[in-house]
Image: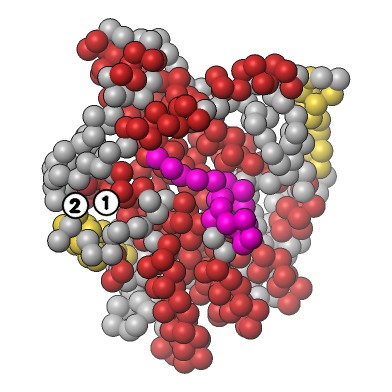
Amino acid sequence: MSNIDYSSKIPNNVNLQEDRTLQRALEGWLPNYLDWWQDMGPSGSHGFDVYLRTATSTTPDGWATFGHVKMPDYRWGIFLAAQEADRKVNFGEHKGEAVWQDVPGEHRANLRRIIVTQGDTEPASVEQQRHLGNTAPSQYDLRNLFQVNVEEGRHLWAMVYLLHKHFGRDGREEAEALLERRSGDADNPRILGAFNEETPDWLAFFMFTYFTDRDGKFQLNALAESGFDPLARTTRFMLTEEAHHMFVGESGVSRVIQRTCQVMKETGIEDPAELRKKGVIDLPTIQRYLNFHYSVTIDLFGADQSSNAAIFYSSGLKGRYEETKRSDDHLLKGDGYKILEVKDGALVEKEVPMLNALNEVLRDDFIKDSAGGVMRWNKVIEKAGLSFRLTLPHKAFNRHIGTFAGIRVSPDGRAISEAEWALNVNDWLATEDDRAFVASLMGRVVETGKYANWIAPPAIGINKQPVDFEYIRFN
Ligand SMILES: [Fe+2]
Ligand SMILES: [Fe+2]
């Protein structure tokens, strides 16, 4: 079961050949997917041979092989983690019952919505990142971008498989619509806000893969707990791929910081304007990018109080992060949770029923997890003997969804006036000028073993290859 059949048109470990109708339906979707990839996948990349990993089995140890492949020939497919014998629903009203192998009728609409919302983010990020290859800082980074892109494409396959297999005609229609929406399109945008923002430069890409792919990690973890077993199994395997995306983000930002600190030490320059003349990204600009990507990403968790979140949980569709490691009753009926609200011009805590606050619970887990990378980035600065420190802004800062939508809060968590916001916003969020400066650094560096001036080379290469390995053959 864990081994993947690569002999059929659509690689899979779900015995696709035994269900001819489903196989035909997915083979019908395949050319539309490839058309989408040609149009909206990484621009100008279709002739390159890229050193990519491809899944070969879904066991934790031996799931990847590495080799040069042309991306349009990448073997996208359907890979589910192995079925757990006698798995039970672990939370909500169905707790203790056997998990569902088919969609329960009463939860059909909600499950479809969850799957479509997750599925929509996958092609969206490929669209957001499609021009970045033109300004890659190295072959190594270009390869990482492409690896992320092909895997987001596969994550779309994962959700489309569930839609085709379990949701009949409307599932097939949703699968088509996933190829029709476009990130940032005024008429037919992607479903969630952060997936309609641009990812115009590589600092934005690294922040996106650190923060926004981490939102993916938490959503997928919550779905990996689902009582709908096929969803749990497919998201469990997706998580193994997601880890690399966050690595690309964390190490990318870290290398930018490392290079900046190196130049600061060599030259003794601390003034951002002077540093920019040396062709590196000053630390305050990195902080402003961080503030933007972090705040936009935490909006993805949804409103702090949500009856939908309560329904998804109580009906066993979407659990909490590490649900089964928690020691409460997994029903949460009488439990409370503290959220924030603005009262008399100040942020104050208020206790609400936990079931309604599950978006906030997941957001808070994300926030804790995000802090780790920031701490490691600060270690790089500290090691260089510099006093600057990066911080995560307060969770009420720059929010557009939930209680804080429309309320101005400073990065240190004070409710402030519109006037104070306007006076300071250019110090808090990346400005046009910041973005123009970062864009000015984005020249294409793709000679084997060369790295752009604004970023340090990685400590080691992919799959333990050297940093000057030929990751891409441009042909
Ligand atoms: Fe993904
Ligand atoms: Fe991802």
Q: Where on the picture, by quarter, is residue 49?
A: bottom left
Q: Nearer the viewer, residue 177 or 160?
A: 177
Q: Where on the picture, by quarter, is residue 281?
A: top left
Quarter of the rendering occupied by the C terminus: bottom left
| Element at label 2 | loop
Q: Residues within 10 Å of mark 2 (few under 14, many from 20)?
A: many
Measuring from the top left, give residue 93's x and y in whole percent: 76, 61
Residues in magenta?
Answer: 183-201
Measuring from the top left, give residue 53's x and y in whole percent: 27, 59
For the residues bearing labels 1 and 2, Cβ distance under 8 angstroms: yes
Using the image, tell me which numbered label, if any, was put on residue 143.
Answer: 1
Work out whether 411 lies above or below 115: above
Queried whether the magenta region covers residue 20, the answer comes back as no
Work out whether 20 lies above or below 111: below
Residue that numbered label 2 is attached to: 471
Q: In this view, does 77 lie to the left or right of 25?
A: left
Badge 2 amino acid = Tyr
Quarter of the rendering occupied by the N terminus: bottom left
Q: Where on the picture, by quarter, is residue 37?
A: bottom left
Cα–Cα gap, marks 1 and 2: 6 Å
Measuring from the top left, give residue 387's x and y in whole percent: 40, 10
| Element at label 1 | helix
Queried whether the magenta region covers residue 199, the answer comes back as yes
Q: Nearer the viewer, residue 373 or 440?
A: 440
Work out whether 434 lies above or below 361: above
Badge 1 amino acid = Arg
Coloring basis for residues? secondary structure
**Residue 351 in view, yes or no:** yes
* Main SS, magenta residues: loop
Q: Which of marks 1 and 2 is nearer the N terminus?
A: 1
Q: Please report the residue visible at 40 percent of the width from the left and 54 percent of the height from the top.
A: 130
